[in-house]
Amino acid sequence: KQEVTQIPAALSVPEGENLVLNCSFTDSAIYNLQWFRQDPGKGLTSLLLIQSSQREQTSGRLNASLDKSSGRSTLYIAASQPGDSATYLCAVLGNQFYFGTGTSLTVIP
Amino acid sequence: SQTIHQWPATLVQPVGSPLSLECTVEGTSNPNLYWYRQAAGRGLQLLFYSVGIGQISSEVPQNLSASRPQDRQFILSSKKLLLSDSGFYLCAWSPTSGDGYTFGSGTRLTVV
């Protein structure tokens, strides 16, 4: 069974800092990987979708990479802002969608 | 463009009462539909998924059931709620290819 792990579970950084969130998965036979953002009490907002044949995707200050062979993905956030504070979840699509438990990010003004 | 609607946003129900949460998708045909539950401080748990009208797969044994009466409508139900049914329920859809999930805004259910 696919297992998705996100480290760290929580992260606190000062505003303006660049940061990296990590996601690892145990089964490399995936179709794609998706990063989500979840604000407290809200649904999930899709940030980036990386197909299994791709190495990275970029959207604004966000860059997600995928190394399928090593079972890893990273989400890079440049010049962090207080509005980036949220929980970030990665999910991989194999025979079904598997979620990590998320990284809670706090950006301190 | 495709949109997903989920309601109600919050719900407080007494133990033993029935439940009906509704989710609808617009702008696409034959979507895969999903119900997830997120308990406090825990990850997302897949409850049900559907690849077509009347086709429901259950991932975990539970007090809940799901139905898909129309192509773009997915309903989560219970005949008698338990305290342990409290949580945050999320509906999602994906294309048949599974190429990216889109989530609804969620329903916060509190069973008292």
Image: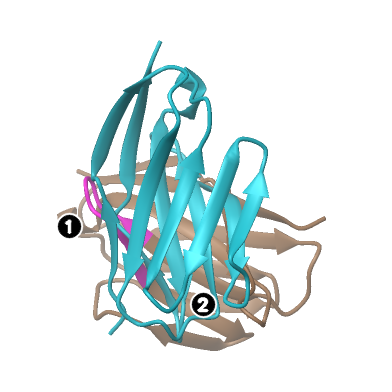
What residue is shown with label 2?
B67
Q: Which residue matches tag 1?
A: B84
- Residue B40 included in the magenta stretch of the image: yes
Q: Earlier in the sequence, mark 2 or mark 1?
A: 2
Measured Cα–Cα span from mark 2 to mark 1: 21 Å
Seen at 55% across and 59% down, the residue is B22
Q: Secondary structure at mark 2?
A: strand
Residue B50's image quarter? Answer: bottom right
- Work out whether residue A19 or residue A48 is closer to the camera in this orientation and state it: A19
Which chain is brown in the picture? B
Nearer to me, B43 or B39? B43
Q: Which residues are magenta?
A: B37-46
Residue located 65% across and 61% down the image? B24
Residue A98 part of the magenta-drawn span: no
- Residue B18 visible at all: no
Identify the colour of chain A in the image.
Answer: cyan
Question: Callout 1, which amino acid?
Answer: Ser
| Image location (x, y in percent) of residue A55 | 58, 66
Please determine whether, in this image, residue A63 is positioned above or below residue B25: above
Q: Can you give x and y, in whole percent of width and height, for residue A74 in the image?
A: 43, 54
Q: Which mark is residue B103?
A: none
Q: Quadrant of the N terminus of chain B?
A: bottom right
In this rendering, is residue A54 above or below A106?
below
Query: Which one is nearer the viewer's eye here, B18 or A78?
Result: A78
**Chain of the residue where label 2 is placed in the rendered structure:** B
Badge 2: how crowded within 10 Å, few (<14), some, or many (20+)?
A: some
Toward which corner of the image does residue B112 lie, by quadrant?
top left
